[in-house]
Each structure stands twice: as C-alpha cells, then as structure tokens.
C-alpha cells in the first residue's frame, strides 16, 4: 500500500530545499551505527547465487559415499565387454563411491525408461551414471527416453562435458547430446558410449559434483532414501 502521507512529507521537504538552496534535515538515520536491513545479504548482491554455497540443508548427507547405479545402453556389447561401463565403475570406486548395481540394457526407449524409473525408486541408489545412446544415429534414443522423466534438468552437465570434450575431439563434439537431470530425487548423468568419453565425464565432472547435486536433490524429501 502506498503511504501518501509519507510521500507528501517528502514533497514538502523538496519544496523547502528549493526555497532555501539547502538540503533540509530529515529524521533518517545516516550514522554508521544504523543496523543493516536483515533481508539484504551483506557483500552478496546476488542472493540467488548464495544457494550454490548453502550446504546447511544437506550436511547430514555424506557426499563422499554415493551408492551408484551404472547403466550401459548398448545392443551390441555385454557386461564382459563394456569398456565404457568399466571406466565409470573405476572412476566412481576410485573416488570412494560404492557400485550397488551395474546393468547393460538394450538400446530401446521402453527399456531405458523402465530401468531409470526402477533405479530411481530404489532406496539404495543415490546417483545413476549412464553411458551410451547419446549420439545422433537412429538407435541413439537414450536422451529421448530419459528427458521426459526429468523433474529438473541439469543443462550445465552437458555444456561442461562438451567444453571438456572439445580438447579431444574438436568440433565433432556437436554430435553428442550428453545431459543430466533429476528423476524423483536421484541425479541421472547420461554420457556417450565410448570409453574415453565415459572416463572424461565420470572423472572430470560426476565424481566432482554428484555428491553436491544429490544432496541438493534430496532436501525436498530427506527420508526418501534413508541411509
């Protein structure tokens, strides 16, 4: 609601200044002892940006020990011949995370959706790392299957993955559609099916940020996945 009395007072003060040539005194406290507005973040002009550093809400979640599901999407390989999946497992385990399940599924839309929904509903899965099916050939349907399941998309993962990949494959990076998002409260990372790409995405991004992202995703329902 507009305070017309206050607005009229300010107008009267301006009139006094015009007539005397001096700025009229007001009852505004300009001393250094005035208390700052508690709603304004001191030294932080971007209040929203502070959310990136607020860890209070997920302190009780241990990001150093993630229960990980590894999924390879391929119609040609097997678990005994899965170098990309091996790279994901090695990267996560080297970082101290536990592999609670590893699966290789056929590159079909329904298979992928059913697998992700099932893993996201498990109480012992904190993060899903997928490899394969992110390209542009006819049987690359991982992105088409997974994106409709995302409650929230994490476009920064794909952007950063392509930035890092540029140093290795140059402009060929435009052919990868790596992405990530949150399904229920579980982060799902989707990377290409090559061993080099899987290692780059896992060691360069996932092991660095999966704990942070998983903790933030769980704040809305902390009892969804009891540990």
Image (cartoon, rainbow, N blue to C red):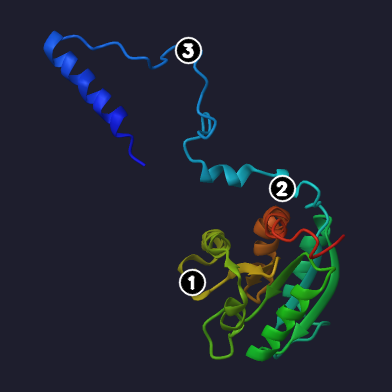
Residue at 53% over, 67% down: 169
Residue density around tag 3, few if under 14, some if 14–19, many if 20 or more, within 10 Å: few
Q: Is residue 65 left or right of residue 179?
A: right
- Which disc is residue 57 wearing? 2
Q: Nearer the viewer, residue 196 or 198?
A: 198
Q: Nearer the viewer, residue 62 or 177?
A: 62
Residue density around tag 1, few if under 14, some if 14–19, many if 20 or more, within 10 Å: few
| Real-space Cα separation, disc 1 to disc 3, in angstroms | 58 Å
Looking at the rendered image, the disc whose residue lies closer to the viewer, 2 or 3, is 3
Residue at 83% over, 69% down: 123
Give the x, y percent position of residue 216. Answer: 68, 55
- Which disc is residue 32 wearing? 3
Q: Is residue 70 above or below residue 126?
A: below
| Real-space Cα separation, disc 2 to disc 3, in angstroms | 34 Å
Q: Nearer the viewer, residue 198 or 160?
A: 160
Question: The N terminus is located in which quarter?
Answer: top left
Q: Earlier in the sequence, mark 1 or mark 3?
A: 3
Looking at the rendered image, the disc whose residue lies closer to the viewer, 2 or 1, is 2
Residue at 13% over, 16% down: 18
Q: Secondary structure at mark 2?
A: helix
Q: Is residue 227 above or below residue 134?
A: above
Q: Is residue 3 above or below residue 210?
A: above
Q: Quadrant of residue 144?
A: bottom right
Q: Quadrant of residue 82?
A: bottom right
Residue bearing mark 1: 172
Q: Earlier in the sequence, mark 2 or mark 1?
A: 2
| Real-space Cα separation, disc 2 to disc 1, in angstroms | 40 Å
């Amino acid at each position: 609601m507009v305070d017309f009395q206050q607005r009229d007072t300010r107008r009267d003060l301006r009139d006094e200044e015009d007539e005397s040539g001096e700025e009229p005194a007001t009852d505004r406290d300009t001393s250094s002892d005035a208390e700052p507005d508690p709603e304004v973040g001191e030294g932080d002009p971007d209040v929203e940006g502070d959310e990136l550093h607020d860890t209070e809400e997920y302190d009780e979640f241990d990001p150093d020990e993630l229960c990980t599901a590894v999924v390879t999407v391929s119609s040609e390989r097997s678990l005994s011949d899965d170098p990309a999946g091996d790279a994901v497992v090695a990267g996560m385990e080297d970082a101290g995370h536990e592999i609670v399940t590893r699966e290789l599924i056929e590159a079909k839309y329904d298979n992928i959706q059913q697998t992700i929904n099932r893993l996201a509903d498990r109480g012992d899965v904190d993060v899903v790392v997928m490899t394969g099916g992110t390209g542009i050939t006819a049987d690359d349907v991982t992105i088409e299957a997974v994106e409709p399941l995302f409650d929230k998309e994490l476009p920064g993962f794909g952007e950063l993955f392509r930035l890092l990949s540029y140093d290795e494959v140059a402009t060929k990076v435009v052919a990868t559609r790596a992405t990530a998002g949150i399904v229920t409260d579980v982060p799902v990372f989707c990377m290409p099916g090559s061993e080099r790409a899987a290692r780059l995405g896992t060691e360069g991004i996932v092991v660095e940020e999966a704990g942070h992202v998983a903790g933030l995703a769980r704040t809305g329902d902390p009892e969804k996945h009891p540990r």
